[in-house]
Amino acid sequence: MRISGLKPFISQESEILILGSMPSIASIKDGFYYAHPQNRMWKIIAELAGVDELKTIEERKSAALKFHLAFFDVIESCEREGSLDSNIKAVKPNDINHLLLLYPKIKRVITNGNKAKNLFLTYNHNCKAEIIHLPSTSPANAGFSLDRLKKLYLPYLVCQD
């Protein structure tokens, strides 16, 4: 089945763009990024925000804006059954370089997982932002504990001028 991703969650103040591959079924249903209850992205950002949890979409959006974070995906549309990256076929990519031109304050792009990394490198040449490749926060990436992911992500979720 062919599916389409979400629109970017981004503002003119965004400095860090976090790129996934393609939203999960839960995220598409909710209309916002990293909605699967076992995905660790919002647990990591809650740590950054100094709170226990970011449960609602509004809390998540507010924290993202506060820390100048933006969310988008490398894939605009694809064929996929379920939510696993390994099931992705027939990719139509998003134009990330064009997005970065529209939002010039973005200084860093973080790819979330190997599929996002590999597709980003395939379709986005000459990117002017700092590129950081990090492991997936998906529950399917059981090899990385939440504590380990926090240690890897947190240093990159704040831009230093």
Image (tube, grey):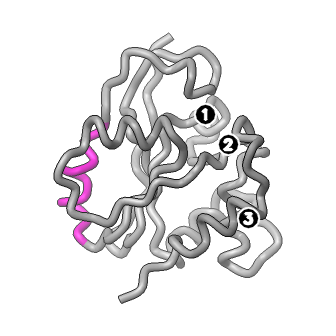
Q: Does residue 126 show up magenta in the picture?
A: no
Q: What element carries label 1?
A: loop
Q: Which of marks 1 and 2 is nearer the N terminus?
A: 1
Give the magenta-colored segment's residue range: 94-104
| Residue in the picture at 68% in, 59% down | 149
Residue matched to label 2: 138
| Residue in the picture at 70% in, 40% down | 141
Task: Indicate the position of residue 46 as horizontal and vertical percent values.
Answer: 71, 70
- In contact (CB < 8 Å): disc 1 and disc 2: yes
Task: Indicate the position of residue 113 as horizontal and vertical percent values.
Answer: 54, 44
Q: Distance between the residues labelled 1 and 3?
A: 18 Å
Quadrant of residue 44 within the rendered picture: bottom right
| Residue in the picture at 31% in, 42% down | 121
Task: Indicate the position of residue 150 as horizontal and vertical percent values.
Answer: 69, 66
Residue matched to label 3: 54
- Residue 24: assigned label: 1
Quadrant of residue 122 within the rendered picture: top left
Q: Which of marks 1 and 3 is nearer the N terminus?
A: 1
Q: In which quarter of the image is the C terminus?
A: bottom left
Q: What element carries label 3?
A: loop
Residue type highlighted by circle 1: Ser
